Image (cartoon, rainbow, N blue to C red):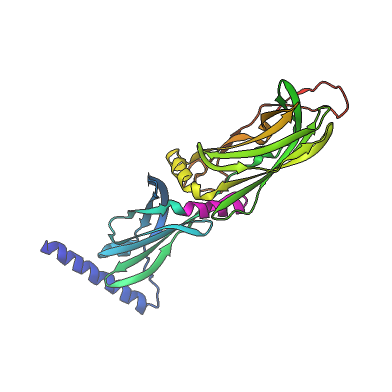
Amino acid sequence: MAFKSSITKIAAVLAVLILIIAVAGGGAVALDRPQIDRVESDWGTVTQERTEIQTRITVDNPRIVKLADATLNVEYTVSLNDIKVADGQKGSVELSGRRNVVEISTWLNNSDIPRWWASHVNNNETTTVTVNPTVETAFIGMHFGAASLTRKRTVQTNLLKPLNVNRTQELHALNRTVLYVNETQAQWGNATVERTPINASATVTNPLPVPLPITNLTYTIRMNGIVVGHGQAGNQTIIPSKSTETINAHAVIDNQKLDEWWVSHRRNGGTSEFTITFNATVSVNGNKVRLPLTALSYNRTFSTHLLGGPAENSSQPAAINSTAPSTVTKAPSVGTTDEPNSIAV
């Protein structure tokens, strides 16, 4: 034990001498400080209230610091679109060998998810993830300035793409075609911490010889089966006979339900099913019929590899898959008797 203590003291004296020589020589010899060589983050435990972030920071240890005892103080932050969602620190980490791996665990509060989601939607469904660790070295009674290595990653989604189509689809009720949906469009409204609006529309043609009243229009939004939005999508309207009109449909995601969705999203490996369904109630020959608006309804799979995954350490969009109706039907021109043609999507 005494021998080890003597060696440590000798190493410290040598390090001080090197510093003195460096100063006397006008800085001809520079004292390298430990540098962050690599940063890796991953998700850990997920609870209803919070989500663990596990980070491994590899520190490159310069030769001179090996001459005497040195310790590291490590801090880091995780931000999503400049919103800090987690931070952590670890002090008095002893340096040994050429490289040292520092493991730090911190927690993201799930209640921060609505604020991040709003920023993601308002930023054209884009999130920049920033992991920023800093290292301060304590060496023979001195403290060296912090070294840092910022790691950034860009993740993109495109959830409303299936609703922006210029293809025609038939809608049936009571064994007959009651509407042709010719075109659909959708875009996000301005998202807040409380709500995320979706503004959709459909250009429809009424082929019937009589007006078609739409007495009710509703929507339901699910994310991994969790209902995050439900309600009235529009007002009553009447589509005149043999005419084309635009139906506006408005849906809202209740962002206060997104922390529940986030838990399912993380437990599913960062993948979710995003589902929107619209239903109309129409009056045909005096009968009120519930009519699924399949042209405005769809199911889409999306992934958010925020801390890494298929596009690790890159700014490439994460993988996105979707399922949508596979067949649509072209509407005949109003006043003609042409048979519709099948079109494969």
Give percent across and percent down for residue 99. 33, 54
Task: Answer above or below: position of 260 versus 34.
Answer: above
Q: Looking at the rendering, in which quadrant would you find the C terminus?
A: top right
Report the front residue among 31 and 312: 312
Report the front residue among 63 and 114: 114
Q: Residue at x 43, y 44 (%)?
A: 263
Residue 36 drawn in magenta: no
Q: Which residues are magenta?
A: 112-128
Q: Quadrant of residue 96?
A: bottom left
Report the front residue among 149 and 292: 292
Give percent across and percent down for residue 210. 82, 29
Residue 333 is left or right of residue 112, and the answer is right
Q: Residue at x 52, y 55 (%)?
A: 115
Give percent across and percent down for residue 318. 55, 42
Q: Looking at the rendering, in which quadrant would you find the N terminus?
A: bottom left
Residue lying farthest left? 2
Residue 286 is left or right of residue 79, and the answer is right
Residue 129 is left or right of residue 169, and the answer is left
Report the front residue among 9 and 151: 151
